[in-house]
Each structure stands twice: as structure tokens, then as C-alpha cells.
Amino acid sequence: MPSRNDSLSDRLSRYRELTITVTGRKSGRRISNPVWFVFEDGKLYLLPVQGSETQWYKNVLKNPEIGIDARGAQADLKVTPTTDAKQVSSVVEKFRKKYGASDVKKYYSNFDVAVAADVH
């Protein structure tokens, strides 16, 4: 029988979208959002659609603990935000490869930050 993490990794390898849950920096409430992601070599990469202006990104700066849900396979992760241009550019390329450059251009307006987390 596969472990919970095997099924999570399996789902992350196949899906195009997952739900992240962050803690509101002002309200303290749990807030869920569907997001695109890239899962590669045990790492989950997130790209906020409006870069550093994205609300969920501002929330993870205050509390880097997030919940993820890939259609029922769930985990709590500690994320590492980055503003390093080289690292952000690398994540943008991963997104372009997975979703296509035109869709990334269509939906994402600011490429100044990215977020990564280890999936254990």
C-alpha cells in the first residue's frame, strides 16, 4: 500500500493545479487558493501571479507554513521565498516548460519572486 507521500508525489507529478492554504497576515484566518506549480526532484515551486504584490505571497512572508492539497493528497510544508533574480528566473523557466510560454505570459504579470518547498 503506498504511503501518503507516495500518493502526494504521484499526484504532484501529474497535476497542473493544486490548492495552497496560507494564514492571513492580518486576519489570522486560513485562506485557500488554487495555484499552478512545478514539482521537480522532490521540490515544489510556486510562482505568485503578481509577484511580490500577490496576497498569498505577502502572507507566506509573515508565516512560511502552508498547506497543500492535490485533489485529496495533503501535506503541510515550510516554504522558502526568494527574490534572487537567478533563482526566480529558473522557476519561471520551469513554469514556461510545463504550462507554455504564452500561458505564463498571459497569467503572470510580475517575475520578481518565487517560492520553493521540500516535499518529504
Image (cartoon, rainbow, N blue to C red):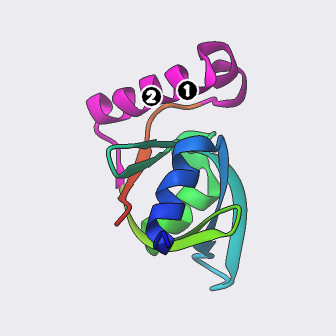
Which residue is identified by label 2? Answer: 94
Which amino acid type is shown beneath numbered disc 1?
Lys
As drawn, 95 above or below 22: above
- The front one of 73 and 20 is 73
The image shows a total of numbered marks equal to: 2
| Residue displayed at 28% across by 38% down | 84
Q: Which structural element holds mark 2? A: helix
The CA span between labels 2 and 1 is: 6 Å
As drawn, 37 above or below 77: above
Identity of the residue furthest to the front in this view: 1
- Classed neighbour count for the residue bearing mark 1: other residues with Cα under 10 Å, few (<14), some (14–19), many (≥20): some
Identity of the residue furthest to the top in this view: 102
Q: Which residue range is magenta in the image?
A: 81-109
Q: Are marks 2 and 1 in contact (CB under 8 Å)?
A: yes
> Looking at the magenta stretch, what is its main secondary structure?
helix
- The front one of 93 and 54 is 93
Q: Which mark is residue 98?
A: 1
| Residue displayed at 64% across by 58% down | 55
Which amino acid type is shown beneath numbered disc 2?
Lys
- Classed neighbour count for the residue bearing mark 2: other residues with Cα under 10 Å, few (<14), some (14–19), many (≥20): some
Q: Is residue 90 magenta?
A: yes
Quadrant where the C terminus sits is bottom left
